[in-house]
Amino acid sequence: MEKSDLQKIVGERIQNLREERGLTQVDLAGKIEGEFDTTNVSRIESGRTNPTLYNLHRIAEALEVSLSELLDISEE
């Protein structure tokens, strides 16, 4: 699997979890601990950027899922 493919799959996973919770990108950015810009959420969800492990952890906490659940792309 290519890096860009993995980024897109993880981004789609984040977007799906966010939408399941009825959150907008602005809502999610506001729930993430520390400063996190809405454009970062957009770039991650679209697969245009490679988020750090720390940022993935922060997103998982904001979505109230474990990091392993966030990265569970087996169904994607």
Image: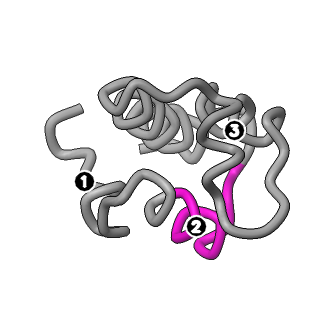
Q: Is residue 55 left or right of residue 35?
A: left
Q: Residue 25 versus residue 11: which sits nearer the camera?
A: 25
Q: Which residue is mark 1?
A: 72
Q: Is residue 10 left or right of residue 46?
A: left
Q: Is residue 48 left or right of residue 11?
A: right
Q: Position of residue 53 (x, y in %)?
A: 59, 72
- Give the residue at x 25% y 59%: 69
Near mark 1 (Cα within 10 A), the count class, few <14, some 14-19 or many ≥20, is: few
The first of marks 1 and 2 along the sequence is 2
Q: Which residue is mark 2?
A: 58
| Three-letter amino acid code at the position of disc 1 | Asp
Q: Which residues are magenta?
A: 50-59
Q: Position of residue 27 (x, y in %)?
A: 62, 35
Q: Quadrant of the N terminus?
A: top left
How far separated are the C-alphas under marks 1 and 3? 19 Å
Q: Which residue is mark 3?
A: 41
Q: Which mark is residue 38?
A: none
